[in-house]
Image: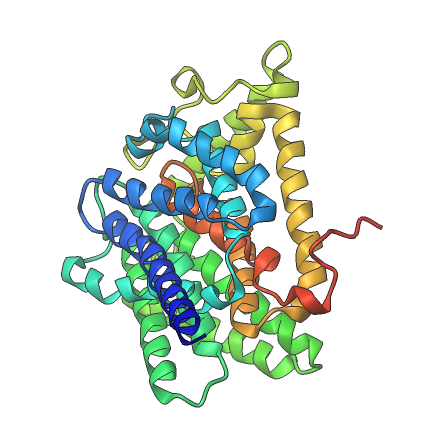
């Protein structure tokens, strides 16, 4: 009996250490992506987490997830060496969905550390910080780095909101939130900054509204917004006098967006399945701030142009599934993953209106897929029936 107990303790300890080491691949991937290093290293770390998580999934999911693991291995060269037709490709969405499916096998106990580890990369970025506009990794681009920082900001804000008696948690989460906000500000990415703040404000006000106490926090958020805009205008006025508006950049985005919107109407059968992801150089190009933009700066327009009506139907199916599971699971989720998960969903949907930074690099796809899967696995299934969607 004593030997059996010792063996069981050793096995449990080994499992805990294994999962900690596995989940440390995610902050490692984020750090490698945000430092001025070859982003291939970050792709290897992020894709390895997805592949390993697919292989150690629960028994009942292996019939579906092990074939996905095979796809990851077969296409490892494509993802790790970034050989997809960029700035957008079908493989990007495949890795997003693979990471999403892998994350549905995460046990409830792992989510606490999983949502804390990536925050630890923020202080390390201070060694590379420069004046605005700051590009964390020149080989990646400022918007892609800012998108990932926006996800980390939402994790830090979720911890800052967490009810706890430990002052050190409040201090570290508060410091991390301010630091993440400052780092995003330095990148000059309007999409990441605005989307993250609006997403978290939406979740905050929604919870207050459900408790019948929305007016005071709403007025407080409005006051903070006005104060922030005032300080921004005082320190760094825009050329138009309107905060957040850049005529050259915004006009270019509108023009290239119009071009991508018209593509499905430009040829035979393109309305049904688009022009494809393989030939971006043959279509829309627009000069923006001295550079050439070759993507729609809008993930919905990008999917519409590249995959037509079928692509929009596929995106809608995924979005409807997410909303169904959130409706059925949010009352059973712990506050920390619930708030972060809902904020990430709003952030992803909003940020997609202004850019396609979610695509192009495996790190952003893996992080997004994992966080979107929160309602599928972070709740207590024993007291509810949301594990199977209610289509009624």
Q: Residue furthest left?
A: 127
Q: Is residue 135 at least partly visible in the picture?
A: no
Going 53% across and 80% down the picture, which residue do you hit?
Answer: 220
Near-viewer residue (201 or 132): 201
Scheme by which the image is coloured: rainbow
Going 58% across and 29% down the picture, which residue do you hit?
Answer: 304
Going 39% across and 64% down the picture, which residue do you hit?
Answer: 11
- Above or below, 153 against 167 in this view is above
Give the side of residue 82 with respect to residue 315, left or right.
Answer: left
Near-viewer residue (78 or 84): 78
Q: Residue furthest top?
A: 268
Near-viewer residue (360 or 233): 360
Residue 346, position as x, y percentages in the image: 56, 56
Quarter that holds the N terminus? bottom left
- Above or below, 350 against 380 in this view is above
Tell me where residue 76 sits by quadrant.
top left
Residue 77, position as x, y percentages in the image: 32, 27
Residue 49, position as x, y percentages in the image: 37, 47
Near-viewer residue (226 or 8): 8
Q: Residue furthest right?
A: 392
Q: Is residue 27 at least partly visible in the picture?
A: yes
Going 44% across and 48% down the picture, which residue do you hit?
Answer: 53
Give the side of residue 73 with respect to residue 311, left or right.
Answer: left
- Above or below, 308 against 175 in this view is above
Tell me where residue 23 sits by quadrant.
bottom left
Residue 259, position as x, y percentages in the image: 51, 25
Total number of numbered labels?
0
- Above or below, 182 against 287 in this view is below
């Amino acid at each position: 009996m004593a030997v059996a107990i010792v063996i069981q303790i050793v096995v449990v300890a080994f499992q805990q250490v294994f999962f900690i080491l596995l989940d440390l691949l995610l902050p490692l991937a984020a750090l490698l992506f945000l430092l001025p290093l070859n982003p291939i290293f970050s792709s290897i770390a992020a894709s390895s987490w997805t592949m390993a998580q697919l292989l150690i999934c629960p028994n009942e999911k292996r019939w579906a997830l092990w074939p996905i693991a095979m796809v990851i291995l077969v296409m490892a060269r494509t993802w790790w060496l970034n050989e997809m037709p960029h700035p957008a490709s079908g493989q990007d969405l495949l890795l997003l969905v693979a990471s999403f499916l892998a994350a549905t096998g995460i046990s409830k106990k792992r989510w606490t550390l999983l949502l804390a580890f990536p925050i630890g990369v923020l202080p390390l970025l201070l060694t590379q910080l420069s004046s605005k506009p700051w590009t964390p990794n020149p080989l990646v681009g400022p918007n892609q780095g800012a998108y990932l920082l926006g996800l980390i900001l939402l994790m830090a804000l979720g911890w800052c909101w967490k009810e706890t008696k430990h002052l050190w948690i409040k201090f570290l989460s508060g410091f991390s939130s301010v630091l993440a906000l400052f780092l995003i500000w330095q990148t000059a990415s309007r999409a990441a900054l605005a989307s993250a703040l609006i997403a978290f404000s939406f979740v905050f006000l929604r919870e207050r509204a459900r408790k019948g106490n929305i007016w005071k926090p709403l007025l407080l958020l409005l006051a903070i917004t006005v104060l922030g805009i005032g300080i921004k205008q005082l320190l760094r006025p825009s050329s138009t006098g309107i905060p957040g508006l850049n005529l050259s950049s915004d006009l270019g985005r509108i023009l290239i967006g119009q071009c991508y919107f018209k593509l499905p109407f430009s040829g035979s059968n393109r309305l049904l399945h688009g022009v494809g992801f393989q030939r971006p150089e043959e279509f829309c190009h627009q000069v923006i701030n001295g550079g050439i933009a070759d993507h729609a700066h809008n993930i919905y327009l990008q999917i519409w142009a590249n995959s037509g009506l079928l692509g929009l139907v596929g995106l809608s199916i995924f979005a409807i599934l997410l909303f169904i599971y959130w409706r059925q699971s949010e009352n059973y989720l712990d506050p920390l993953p619930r708030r972060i998960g809902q904020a990430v969903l709003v952030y992803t949907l909003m940020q997609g209106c202004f850019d396609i930074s979610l695509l192009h690099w495996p790190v952003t796809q893996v992080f997004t897929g994992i966080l979107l899967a929160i309602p599928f696995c972070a709740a207590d299934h024993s007291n509810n029936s949301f594990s199977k969607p209610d289509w009624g």
